[in-house]
Amino acid sequence: MDNGKEGLRNSHPRVDPQLRALEEENERLKRIVAKQALELEVKSELQKNSYRTQEKIEIMSHYQQHTSRKELCKWLELPRSLSYYKPRHGKPGAKASQVTMKLDDAFVPNEDVVHRIKRLIDTEFNAFGYEYAAHELKKEYVINKKKAAAAQCIDSCQ
């Protein structure tokens, strides 16, 4: 009210549209240069290390916060599905069971099954295989051919 007509005018300085377009273009070019510099850094890191997949994944995890997973995979020549892989340490597969279930739902140690197999095959002119052993053991135990074969192998290897 105190300024009259001057108070009604826009007090923000006008920016020239050409100048604004040039600033936006400058920012876009800076992002492109930064991305190319990062790509060169990743590729130079790859040159230092071997071309093993595990090392590529380590490089990828190091630079993941700087760019997208898709671009890193392209630069490192990795399939994107492999970038989600989390390595597990230790022996693969399930641990071997230490017990076997009997038909009456009681558990017995595997050594008892091995002793039972010894009694089965401890005959003169033995020609029994693991399938026969599994068939006979199923009369007392809940067992499959694989476990019978493993138990028979333990018996014959000792």
Image: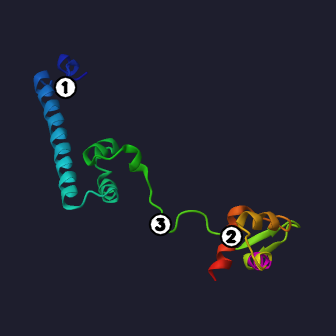
Which quadrant of the figure has residue 16?
A: top left
Q: Assess whether mark 2 and mark 3 are in contact (beta carbons under 8 angstroms).
A: no
* Alpha carbon separation for disc pair 1 and 3: 66 Å
Query: Which dot, 1 or 2, sits closer to the camera?
Result: 2
Q: Position of residue 155 (x, y in %)?
A: 68, 78
Three-letter residue code for mark 1: Ser
Q: Position of residue 51 (x, y in %)?
A: 26, 56
Q: Quadrant of the N terminus?
A: top left
The residue where tag 2 is placed is 97
Q: Position of residue 123 (x, y in %)?
A: 79, 79
* Alpha carbon separation for disc pair 3 and 2: 20 Å
Residue furthest toward the bottom? 158
Q: Between residues 50 and 73, which one lies in front from this camera angle? A: 50
> Which region of the structure is painted magenta?
112-119
Report the magenta stretch's main SS: helix
Q: Assess whether mark 2 and mark 1 are in contact (beta carbons under 8 angstroms).
A: no
Kind of element beneath mark 3 = loop
Q: Quadrant of the C terminus?
A: bottom right
Three-letter residue code for mark 3: His
Q: Mark 3 or mark 1, which is nearer the start of the sequence?
A: 1
At label 1, counting other C-alpha atoms closer than 10 Å, the crowd grade (few under 14, some 14-19, many 20 or more) is: few
Q: Residue at x 17, y 20 (%)?
A: 6
Query: Is residue 62 shown above or below 2?
Result: below
The residue where tag 1 is placed is 11
The residue where tag 3 is placed is 89
Query: Which dot, 1 or 3, sits closer to the camera?
Result: 3
Q: Residue at x 23, y 61 (%)?
A: 49
Query: Which dot, 3 or 2, sits closer to the camera?
Result: 2
